[in-house]
Amino acid sequence: MLQPVLPQKRVTLANGIELDVVDEGPRAAPALIFLHGFPESHRTWRHQIAHLSGRFRCVAPDQRGYRGSSKPAGVDAYTPDKLIGDVFLLADALGIDKFTVIGHDWGGAIAWGVAYTGQMNGRVPRAVIANAPHPVGFSRLVWLNRHQRQSSQYMRVFRDTANDQLIRDFGLVGMLAKGFEGRLETEDKMEPAERAQLLKDWEDRDAALAMINWYRASPLYVPEMDEPYEIPADRAPPALPPLTLPTLVIWALEDVALPPENLDGLEELVPNMTLVRVPDCGHFVPWEAPEAVNAALDAFLGNDA
């Protein structure tokens, strides 16, 4: 049995999308919305929800395209603006005005967008990002840094529709095997029950294609390895103002997909940043190093989000 047990409920958003959602903790408490990444689920945050739900309202959806949540057809249904919009519509559906957004991996990419939107509309007082690069810095790094470009080549595999037969034949495992060529990390660090559930989730062909559509809908261009190591004029990074919200960035230093060079210059883009480096830890820091993540969250959030 999966531990801790995290009951889910079905929540219908104003745009018609239905999400399976964990909603734990006192309803009147400050709200935290946790966003998982690829290729996981709300259970990315199992240790943090168990730790924080006594003091905070902890909301964790299976995002659009994942597990039992809605899987609209077509790549255009997974553009970042729609995924960011889902988060605010989820808050609306749950009667939440202001919330702290907390994201890892792809959930962190969406959390950056939620934070920027929240900076404008006043609904997001704080943000927490775990091993998810800032969109400006990352769009530079894939051009200028050989390590990051090499580590990002799997995205080109995911975007190639000629590989969709792998999903039809084997589920998500087929695409992962080709994209990462045996370089998947942390297999021995996940609890057996969690791994078994994840493998079962990956058998769903519709969900697998929806997850891959997140990559296909992203505007990020990943150059081939033999393209010049300079940023073309038509590939300039997105123009974003500084993110001035208090922002906690947690970075596991042994992430094979996202090297710590992603932190270079981040203080200029996020001047009100608290940075916590987690040594000897791979990409999936929320469950690989839960004590470190929980301690960082405690220090950042205090008793009032």
Image (cartoon, grey):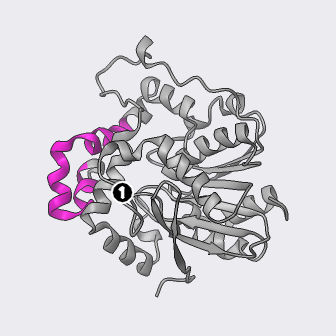
Is residue 121 toward the left or the right of residue 190 in the image? right
Camera sees residue 251? no
Q: Amino acid at mark 1?
A: Leu
Q: Residue 24 appears at what percent x and percent y?
A: 66, 75
Identity of the residue drawn at 73% across and 56% down = 97
- Above or below, 19 relative to 144: below
* Res 158 quadrant in image: top left
Identity of the residue drawn at 60% across and 42% down = 112
Does the segment drawn in magenta span residue 253? no
- Segment colored magenta: 150-178
Identity of the residue drawn at 45% across and 47% down = 256
- Above or below, 224 relative to 287: above
- Above or below, 71 relative to 212: below
Q: Nearer the viewer, residue 53 or 191?
A: 53
Q: Residue 281 appears at what percent x and percent y?
A: 55, 57
Locate the C terminus by quadrant.
Answer: bottom right
Q: Nearer the viewer, residue 262 or 160?
A: 160
Is residue 136 toward the left or the right of residue 271 in the image? left
Q: Residue 283 appears at what percent x and percent y?
A: 50, 54
* Res 118 quadrant in image: top right
Q: Residue 218 appears at what percent x and percent y?
A: 41, 38
Residue at label 1?
184
Extreme residue toward the right, this view: 303
Camera sees residue 207? yes
Is residue 290 toward the left or the right of residue 83 in the image? right
Q: Residues within 10 Å of mark 1 (few under 14, many from 20)?
A: few
Q: Secondary structure at mark 1?
A: loop
Magenta: main secondary structure: helix
Extreme residue toward the top, this view: 233
Extreme residue toward the bottom, this view: 1
